[in-house]
Image (tube, helix red, strand yellow):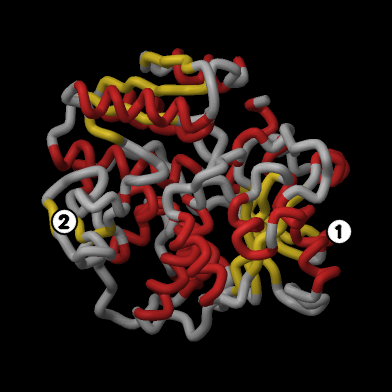
């Protein structure tokens, strides 16, 4: 499918970024032309690919690079008065598999034989795994201090990890140098529109699991915003198709000290409420999200919010999650912690119906 620039309206057959510098989107994303199916008889045997009517990749099932991902459990979390979507039970242990399956499927459709990606861990492991599934070579650029468990997950797929000293932005710069200097395809979770098409399936699954009822609010961790934007895009697609009749408020949870969305909405003090940064939430420490403007628009249009979570708040929440049987990695805990703050602020009311995304497995860290 053609890609289009939302800023200058340029179109491309394939490119990782517009010449004007803007991220690209699918020019004509598919929408079903039929009434929504009965949720009781909905056939979910193909996992997230059961929503192929909304997906711009994988029209030919033979091209799909899949490990049976999707349709993750949506379970009651009584201690939080919410429902948790358990996206940490994916094949590689994180929600990034949603985007990896659609991104590598597009790579197969385009005849790609080598991909590169930059990642703090989860996205790299997902892209490497799905590249291995597709028989495509992969090179994953990671921070030099990446956790050993995530590095092992990348290496065991046969992908080549490239450790880069410096900031998270230095990792991206090194990866982009490789894209410019070689013939690799950039399978970026921050830039590639196929990745966001995959994360939108979070919304489709949540809706059908709830009988096409939209929650009042969805709370999710936010780094580059791949899941937050997928949630927005997915619920918007359902609404536009006439399958649902509302949008949820979207609340993003960030790491205190590295919270650019919170800073844009509420100022520096709100983004850094503690003198110490929340280093435990290393998976979302992104100081310059590629699609910051889109994230802010999604929050504004849904009357949502963004909240910075301190490390002590994260640690307390993580202990509660584990004690309740939700074995997540530390970064995940920012979302239920943010839910508590949102309720205290009144952004989310006490009687609101809330879904919280739990995004990464505790087995990884």
Q: Tell me how far mark 2 sits from mark 1, CA to CA.
A: 44 Å
Where disc 1 sits, the SS reads helix
- Residue drawn at point x = 60 percent, y = 36 percent: 283
Say if residue 275 shows up in the picture. yes
Where disc 2 sits, the SS reads loop
Q: Residues within 10 Å of mark 2 (few under 14, many from 20)?
A: some
Which residue position holds label 2? 1
Left or right: 184 with respect to 229?
left
- How far from the left and from the top, in percent, is residue 328? 70, 38
Q: Quadrant of the C terminus?
A: top right
Q: Residues within 10 Å of mark 1 (few under 14, many from 20)?
A: few
Please tell me which of labels 2 and 1 falls first in the chain. Answer: 2
Left or right: 243 with respect to 136?
right
Quadrant of the image occupied by residue 15: top left
Q: Is residue 243 above or below residue 50?
A: below
User: Looking at the image, which is closer to me, 265 or 251?
Assistant: 265
Quadrant of the image occupied by residue 314: top right
- Residue drawn at point x = 76 percent, y = 54 percent: 269
Which residue position holds label 1? 79
Quadrant of the image occupied by residue 27: bottom left
User: Looking at the image, which is closer to me, 349 or 80?
Assistant: 349
């Amino acid at each position: 499918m053609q890609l289009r620039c939302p800023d200058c309206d340029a179109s491309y057959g394939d490119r990782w970024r517009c010449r004007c510098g803007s991220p690209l989107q699918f020019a004509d994303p598919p929408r079903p032309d039929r009434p929504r199916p009965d949720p009781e008889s909905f056939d979910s045997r193909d996992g997230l690919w059961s929503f192929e009517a909304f997906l711009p990749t994988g029209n030919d099932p033979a091209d799909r690079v899949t490990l049976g991902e999707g349709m993750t459990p949506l379970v009651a979390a009584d201690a939080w008065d919410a429902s948790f979507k358990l996206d940490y039970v994916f094949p590689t242990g994180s929600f990034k598999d949603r985007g990896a399956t659609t991104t590598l499927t597009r790579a197969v459709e385009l005849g790609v034989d080598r991909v590169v990606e930059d990642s703090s861990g989860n996205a790299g492991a997902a892209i490497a795994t799905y590249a291995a599934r597709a028989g495509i070579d992969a090179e994953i650029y990671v921070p030099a201090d990446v956790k050993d468990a995530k590095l092992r997950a990348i290496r065991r797929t046969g992908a080549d990890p490239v450790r880069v000293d410096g900031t998270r932005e230095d990792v991206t710069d090194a990866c982009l140098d490789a894209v410019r200097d070689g013939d690799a395809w950039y399978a970026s979770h921050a830039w590639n529109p196929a990745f966001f098409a995959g994360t939108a399936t979070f919304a489709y699954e949540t809706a059908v699991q709830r009988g096409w009822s939209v929650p009042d609010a969805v709370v999710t961790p936010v780094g580059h915003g791949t899941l937050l934007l997928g949630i927005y895009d997915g619920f918007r697609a359902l609404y536009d198709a006439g399958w649902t009749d509302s949008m949820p408020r979207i609340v993003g949870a960030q790491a205190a000290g590295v919270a650019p969305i919170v800073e844009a909405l509420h100022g520096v003090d709100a983004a850094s409420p503690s003198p110490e940064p929340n280093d435990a939430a290393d998976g979302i420490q992104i100081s310059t999200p590629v699609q910051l403007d889109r994230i802010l628009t999604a929050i504004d249009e849904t009357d949502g919010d963004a909240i910075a979570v301190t490390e002590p708040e994260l640690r307390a929440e993580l202990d509660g999650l584990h004690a309740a049987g939700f074995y997540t990695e530390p970064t995940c805990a920012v979302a239920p912690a943010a839910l508590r703050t949102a309720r205290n602020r009144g952004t989310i009311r006490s009687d609101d119906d809330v879904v919280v995304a739990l995004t990464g497995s505790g087995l990884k860290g």
